[in-house]
Amino acid sequence: MRIGGNQTLYGSVELSYGLFETVQMRVSAFYDYGMLGEDKITQIQRSSVGVALEWISPIGAITFIIPKALDAKRGDDTSSFEFTMGQRF
């Protein structure tokens, strides 16, 4: 089964709120979406929502993310918790 396409559209919307200015910590809610297709860009559509807690520590950004796929299909690679360290994008 081939998965992919030659057309793609994706994006993200995030609402962030600073919790503690002195320690550079924030909480955010997000919505991510993506569409993919060969001839029609809407052949494959996925989206997710979630919350995140980010702390800009002395060694870099540390982020805890809890995502939830809104329209996952059988065989999709989804996660219920993510932890990242390093630079912010």
Image: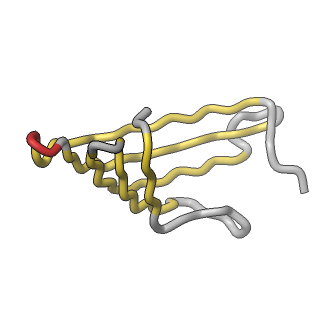
Vertical side of 78 occupied by 62: above or below: above
Pick whichever, 86 or 58, lies toward us.
Answer: 58
Left or right, 11 with respect to 3, comes to: left
Vertical side of 58 occupied by 67: above or below: below
Q: Position of residue 12 (x, y in %)?
A: 45, 38
Residue drawn where x is 80% and y is 37% of the image: 5
Pick whichever, 54 or 37, lies toward us.
Answer: 54
Q: Looking at the image, what colour scheme do you see?
A: secondary structure
Residue drawn where x is 10% and y is 46% of the image: 20
Q: Position of residue 29 (x, y in %)?
A: 31, 49
Pick whichever, 81 or 2, lies toward us.
Answer: 81
Residue drawn where x is 68% and y is 62% of the image: 76
Q: Position of residue 33 (x, y in %)?
A: 53, 43
The residue most toward the right is 1
Q: Position of residue 87 (x, y in %)?
A: 42, 37
Number of marks: 0
Left or right, 77 with respect to 17, comes to: right
Left or right, 26 with respect to 3, comes to: left
Q: Quadrant of the C terminus?
A: top left
Vertical side of 51 occupied by 39: above or below: above
Residue drawn where x is 82% and y is 49% of the image: 3
Q: Quadrant of the N terminus?
A: bottom right
Left or right, 2 with respect to 8, comes to: right
The residue most toward the front is 59
Kindly indicate the quadrant of the structure image that contains residue 23.
top left
